[in-house]
Image (tube, grey):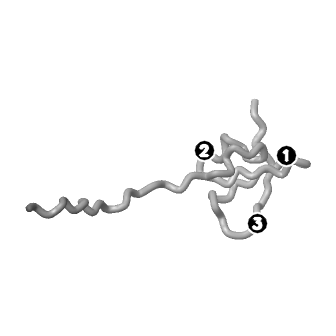
Amino acid sequence: MTAPARPVKQSPSVVPRRRLELHNHQIDQGVAATHRCGNTHLPTGRVCLLPERHPGGCYFTERASRA
């Protein structure tokens, strides 16, 4: 009798962390695409330009005017 085949141990694949909040209406998709926070302060329309997943609270700044 032969021994049953042992499964080959594979190294875990590296899976990038997805930003689950991107479906949220308060996230600016264009800003988020540049790996920035993109959280929008809805009453003023200001947006957070800090890096994605930054520690602490957001720092909201005026949006650049679009021509």
Amino acid type at mark 1: Gly
- Pick out the residue farthest to the right: 43
The secondary element bearing badge 1 is classed as: loop
Q: Quadrant of residue 54?
A: bottom right
In the picture of the structure, the residue carrying the numbered disc 1 is: 45
Residue 33 circle label = 2
Image location (x, y in percent) of residue 60 = 79, 56
- Pick out the residue farthest to the top: 67
Q: Which class describes the residues within 10 Å of circle 3: few (<14), some (14-19), or many (20+)?
A: few
**Residue visible at 77% across and 43% down?**
25
Q: Are marks 1 and 3 in contact (CB under 8 Å)?
A: no
Image location (x, y in percent) of residue 1 = 8, 62
The secondary element bearing badge 3 is classed as: loop
Amino acid type at mark 3: Gly
In the shown orientation, is residue 35 left or right of residue 38? left
Amino acid type at mark 2: Ala
| Disc on the earlier residue, 3 or 2 | 2
- Pick out the residue farthest to the bottom: 56
- Pick out the residue farthest to the left: 1
Residue 43 vs residue 67, the one in the foreground: 43
Q: CA distance from mark 1 to mark 2?
A: 18 Å
| Disc on the earlier residue, 1 or 2 | 2
Number of numbered discs overlaid on the protein picture: 3
Q: CA distance from mark 3 to mark 2?
A: 20 Å
Q: Which class describes the residues within 10 Å of circle 1: few (<14), some (14-19), or many (20+)?
A: few
Rendered-image quadrant of the C terminus: top right
In the picture of the structure, the residue carrying the numbered disc 3 is: 57
Q: Which class describes the residues within 10 Å of circle 2: few (<14), some (14-19), or many (20+)?
A: few
**Residue visible at 67% across and 69% down?**
55
